Amino acid sequence: MRAASFDGAITFAQDLIRIPSLPGEEGELARRVVTEMEALGYDEVRTDELGSVIGVVRGGGEGGTVMLSAHLDMVSAGDPDEWEHPPFDGVVAGGYLHGRGAMDIKGPLALQVHAAAALRGRVAGDIIVAHPVYEERGGWGMDHLVRPDGGLSPDVVIIGESTHGDIAIGHRGRTEVEIVAHGLAGHASAPDRARNALDLLPAILAGVRDLAARQGSDAVLGPSSVVATGVGAVPASLNVIPDRVTVTLDWRILPEDTGESLVARVRQSLQPHLDRAGKATWAGAADSVQVRIATETQRTYTGVEAARRMFSPGFLMDPSDPIVTAAARAVGTRGDSDAPARVRPWTFATDGGWTRGVRGIPTIGFAPGEERHAHTNTERLDLEEARWGYAKHLDLVPAVQGAVNAGSAR
């Protein structure tokens, strides 16, 4: 059995970076994670139906179950020539681990895998280490992992998305909304025989601007935001008048938002503009516009296929929750261990929206790494910060288990 260590975790992270793992293509990476867990002596290691990896380190007695979770998939690396170091080489240079996934999220994933093994015999409750698929495209893997009928049911979840050493307690969610205008296709040489769906685009964009100006806000998470990020016309031939135009919105939402409420708000904002456009275009133009949550057909590397809504919920923990305060005390501030860690939300969405926002499981975030490097060609993990973060996991897990046990005893 291999001993857990920080140096071993970084070597493991380098291996993970060298295995590209886009959503739906995580199979090779999952097998490497399983191999590492088995070598570290996990009590149970398996993959579920979707291919997410689950490892368990059994506790030594009665206690709360803590789940550490990162994710297996990554975003595209883009043009390799735009990187200082090749994105899939796992280079260590200048005190950093470089590459796609270094801090989002293969570096923190490796730290979690080794930290859980290092805690064997030191904690009362079980530690589940669960790394799901498809986090980057809506969180299908986590939604399935913590499903009510037969899924995992930990007492606390610690998400390994980078926090720069802070304790994260929530984030806005994200959804993609599609506004689809329907017309009548025709040859571009005879526009009077067609109904150009593009004629409704100005009204749609005006409605989106009105919607963006009327966003709610949360005292901790800040305001929600919505912006048009894409326009697609069908047919795509440039000598054909399109009969369908789709405007895609990226909407950063608050925890109370639902798909149904978002669709209703879009319709309300569009209606006056579409009514005016209908008078200038063709009869019934306003009624030809659909609003829907975008869906995507996703297929896991295990062969499971489903149409999934592009809806990632938000969540927010109470900053005064005993689990949060115990975590902040256990982690401390880097350079001043007597001061509790800063407690704040993430700027981006995570799988915590599923664990806390939907299933109600207490969820916090902790990992080394700076959010500003996520999804960029400067992605890197500071190794000194990572070493500190690894050591702090050894205090964090028993601290939140203790908070769970204290709450159960009351």
Image (tube, rainbow, N blue to C red):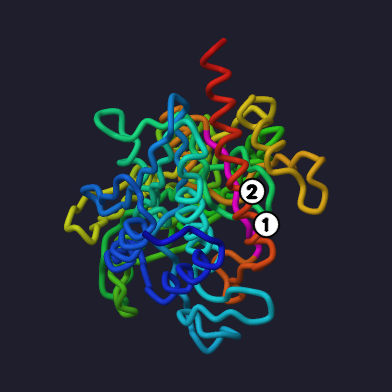
Q: Whole-percent x and y of residue 56? A: 36, 43
Depth check: give the residue in front, 219 or 399: 399
Q: Whole-percent x and y of residue 85? A: 56, 85
Q: Is residue 30 left or right of residue 225?
A: left
The residues colored magenta run 363-372
Depth check: give the residue in front, 283 or 271: 271
Relative height, residue 103 to residue 209 (above, below):
below
Specify few, some or many for label 2: CA neighbours under 10 Å numbering under 14, 14-19, or 20 or more: many
The residue at the point 68 percent across, 61 percent down is 385
Q: Are marks 1 and 2 in contact (CB under 8 Å)?
A: yes
Q: Look at mark 2 in the image and give the residue it sits on.
A: 392
Q: Look at mark 1 in the image and give the residue it sits on.
A: 388
Specify few, some or many for label 1: CA neighbours under 10 Å numbering under 14, 14-19, or 20 or more: some
Q: Which residue in the rendered view is the most extreme toward the left?
A: 303
The residue at the point 58 percent across, 64 percent down is 374
What secondary structure is found at the residue carrying circle 2? helix
Q: CA distance from mark 1 to mark 2?
A: 6 Å
Depth check: give the residue in front, 22 or 275: 22
Q: Whole-percent x and y of residue 166? A: 69, 47
Q: Quadrant of the C terminus?
A: top right
Q: Could you say which quadrant of the image residue 299 lies in?
A: bottom left
Q: Could you say which quadrant of the image residue 194 lies in?
A: bottom left
